[in-house]
Image: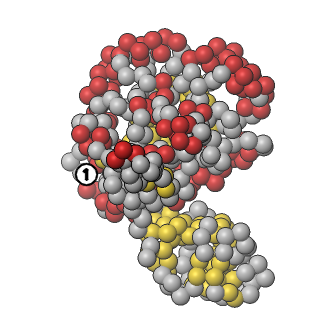
Amino acid sequence: MELLSPAGSIEKLFYAYEYGADAAYIGLKNFSLRAKADNFRKDEYLEIKNIKKNKKLYAALNIYFHDYDIKQLESEIDYISNYPIDAFIISDIGLIPVMKKYFPNTELHLSTQANCVNTNSAKLYRDMGFSRIIPGRELSLKEIEDIKRNVDNLEIEVFVHGAMCLAYSGRCFLSKYLADRSANKGDCAHSCRWKYRVLEESERQGEYFPLIEGENFTSILSSKDICMIDHIKDLQNAGIDSLKIEGRMKSIYYTAVVTRAYRKMIDSISAANEFKGRRNNFIDNNLDQYVNEIYKVSHREFSTGFYYSKEEIEESTYKSYMTEYNFLGSISELIKNTSFHNKYCYLLDVKNQISVNKEIEYIGPDLLYMIDTNYSLYNENFDNVLKADHGKISYLVTDKKLEKGFIIREKHH
């Protein structure tokens, strides 16, 4: 099975591949349902080509296109052609002739926004030229399995981790109504995550209906997150071709940790299948701990979505985002020829303030975590400092051997 991870920026794309994704999906500016992500533009395709290597890259063009959107897309075809895209994820079938005209050799994947929820529809989309569908998230695993078994020459990709939408496959008008930001045009205000307080109703005397928004608020409209990491074998048995992680707007810490956990689980299942009877010799002894790491990333209550029943996912969550660790930054590169004898000096990419005299942890693609309390921080002039801040050139000196792409975190207090 393919592991497909989100990449809302060049940086996230690097971490998706580095931490185990077989493929990543990106958005192109103006044509993606995550308009607030750092969708790709300018000459970033040059860097993407260097990062991608032999991995797969999919581009989401999954808004519903008006005539003026199609004209704008056609005006940017030459630019889009610069990207090493293996498939386009689309929901609007009016885009098919455009894509076949300009990208005849590039696969088409049907977005979950198209609400493909039955075998007849799946066959029709296949005959239109789609090599893969991402069915509506309201389907059970049994229904998905039936589609896979009854439709030849069609791959199926499903969401296995991340946020779920209150509306039917994301077709929601709540954001447009409350904030004049259309979810179906990539500008969702996530109104279902707001905290609603109805202060007065009787005879509607005061007409109070204040809306309070905050990153850590939830509400009766907020759905639980999906997490299928303990059920990968069931997905494999159902014939699923690609496992998709949601979250192009989330942090590189989320991308790295979640991708790594699913990578370890998929590899362990593959090893167990190949070497039956010798299972313990081929499974990472730290598998359970890698899986447990996903609970250390900010998330709402987990569920198994609609795969096994509707009851669990149809219950909204009243709990706030659960956060066990703070993401501080990452290692950019090893600095050689420094005067720090018997120690290593690293250039940092600081996301949130790092302070000395605190316990921090490093994680890597194959490093569960490593604790460090004996480190020093330096500014751009290599003056010893007490803290390193985002946006400033900073260095970390330690006796720990680290690598580019290792992530730094600290426990949330």
Q: Position of residue 364 (x, y in %)?
A: 50, 63
Write the residue at 64% across / 69% down: 350
Q: Is residue 123 above or below residue 108?
A: above
Q: Is 79 placed left or right of 356 in the picture?
A: right
Q: Is residue 290 above or below residue 67?
A: below
Q: Position of residue 407 (x, y in %)?
A: 54, 66
Write the residue at 60% across / 39% down: 180
**Residue placed under numbered mark 1 in the picture:** 279
Foreground pick, 163 / 273: 163
Quadrant in the rendering for residue 321: bottom left
Foreground pick, 391 / 63: 63
Quarter of the image with the C terminus is bottom left
Report the amino acid beneath label 1.
Arg
Q: Is residue 387 visible?
A: yes
Q: Is 245 placed left or right of 56 in the picture?
A: left
Quadrant in the rendering for residue 387: bottom right
Q: Is residue 224 visible?
A: no
Write the residue at 41% across / 48% down: 205
